[in-house]
Amino acid sequence: MGRHAPEGKRDGWTCWWVLQRNWLSLTWAQKRHRRKKYFGNNLQHLAPGKGRMKAPAGLFSALVLLLLITATLGQRTRPRKPTRRPAVPRQPPAPRAEPQEPTDVPPLILGPPSPYPDCPRECSCSPSYPNSLNCENRNIRTVPVIPSRTHYLYLQNNYITEVTAEPFRNASEVRWINLANNRIHRIDKQVFQKIPALLYLYVQRNQLKEVPSGLPASLEQLRLSKNRISKIPAGALGKMGNLTLLDLYHNQLSDGDLGKNTFKDLSNLMQLNLAHNVLRKMPAGVPNSLIQLFLDKNRIEDIPKDYFQGFSHLAFVRLNYNQLSDKGVPRAVFNISTLLDLQLAHNQLASIPLFSAHLEHLHLNHNTIENINGTLICPRSLQEDMSDPSQIPRLRYLRLDGNQLSPPIPLDVIMCFRHLHSIVI
C-alpha cells in the first residue's frame, strides 16, 4: 500500500485491502460470465451425468478471506498484565531510644521583665507579691540564686536534679519552699543551715531515696510523698518538735526502716501518712499527739492489743487495703473514745470490731462479714434508757457492701444506732 497503517492496526488494514482487491476480481469475473451467457460466446452445455458449473476460484478466496478478517477483528487485544514487582520486606522501625539528660529537657522559659534587678531571668517577680519568687513551670535544671527578700519560693514542675546550698546563701528569710514534681535525688544538708526559719517544705513526686538530713527545727510541714524513700537516717527527724504534718505516702518503707525512736521527738505531730508502703506491722513509737493516722495499702496483718492506748486526740484511723483478719485484730482495739472515723475496708475481717459510742463513720466494705448482731456491736445496752440524746451512739454512716450480707438490716441495729443516716449493704 502507498501509506502505512498505524502500528497495532496494520493487520486490520492489510485484510481490508486484500478483501477489496478480491472483491473487484470477483465482480469482473461475474460480468464476463453474464456476457457469455447472453451473447453465446463459448457456451458450454452440461453433459449427461455431470454436476453443476464450477464456481469461480476468486469467490472461494474471498469467502475465506472474509472469515479470516471476521475472526481477526473479533479478537480483542488482551491487556497485558502489569508486571508485579517483587515485594520488598519492610524493615521494622528502629525502637526509639529513651532520651537521656539533658537532651530530654525542653528549653528554658524565661520570665517576664521584672522591676527587681535581683530577680532571676528564669523566674517571675511580681510587685504585688514582693516576697514571692515564682519559678514554677520554667524547665529549670538548677535552683537559681534566691534574692534575700524571698519568703515564698515556688520551684515545682521543673527538671531540678539536686539542691545545693550555694543558691540559698542570702535566703535566710525563706519560709515556704515548693519543690514538687522535679527529679531531685539529693538535697545537701547545708541547704537548711541557710534557711533556719523554714516552715513548709514540699518535695513530693521526686526521686529521693532517703529523708533529707539536717532539717531545721522550725519546720511545721514536711511532704515527701511519691518518692523512692526506703531509709530514714538516724536523727533525721530529731529536734523537730514543731512538726505537725509528716507525709511519707507512696514510698518504699518497711518495718526495719522505722525504729522505735524514729518519731520520738515529734511531740506535736498531728498527721502521719505512711500509706502505700510495705509495712507488715503497725509503726512503733508513734507520738500520742496524733489526730490522723493513715496506713492504707500496706501489708499489716495484726495490731497489738494496747496499740492505741495513750492516744488522747486520735480521731481518724485508716487501714484500708491491708491483710487484717479477726485473728490479728483484738475485738476492742478500736474502742477509743476520741475516734470519729474508722476505715477498715478491703481486708479479711469476718466480724465487726467493737467501737465507742462517739464513732460517726465506719467503713467495713469488702471484707468477709456474713452477719450483723446489733446487740453485740451496740456500744450501749438496748435495755438502757436512751431518752437522753447524749447517750445514743453517734454512728451516722455505715458501709458494709462487698461482704456476704443481704437485706434487710436487723432491727436491733436500727434500735441501737438511731442517728444512722446512711447504711450501704
Image (spheres, rainbow, N blue to C red):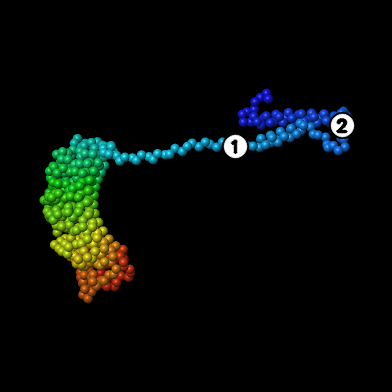
Q: Is residue 81 above or below residue 372?
A: above
In front of the other: 2 or 258:
2
Residue ID for mark 2? 44
Question: Label 1: how many residues lie within 10 Å, few (<14), some (14-19) or many (20+)?
Answer: few
Q: Which mark is residue 78?
A: 1
Rendered-image quadrant of the N terminus = top right
Quarter occupied by residue 328? bottom left
Kind of residue at disc 1: Arg
Quarter occupied by residue 364? bottom left
Element under label 2? loop
Q: Where does the image place residue 160, in percent across and percent down from the top left?
A: 23, 41
Q: Which of the two discs, 1 and 2, labels the residue nearer the N terminus?
A: 2
Rendered-image quadrant of the C terminus = bottom left
Identify the residue at image location x=24%, y=54%.
Answer: 276
Element under label 1? loop
Identify the residue at image location x=15%, y=57%.
Answer: 284
Q: Where does the image place residue 290, in percent across and percent down from the top left?
A: 16, 58
Give the mark toward the camera: 1 or 2.
2
Question: Which residue reaches farthest bottom?
Answer: 383
Q: In this view, does 417 lie above or below 286?
A: below
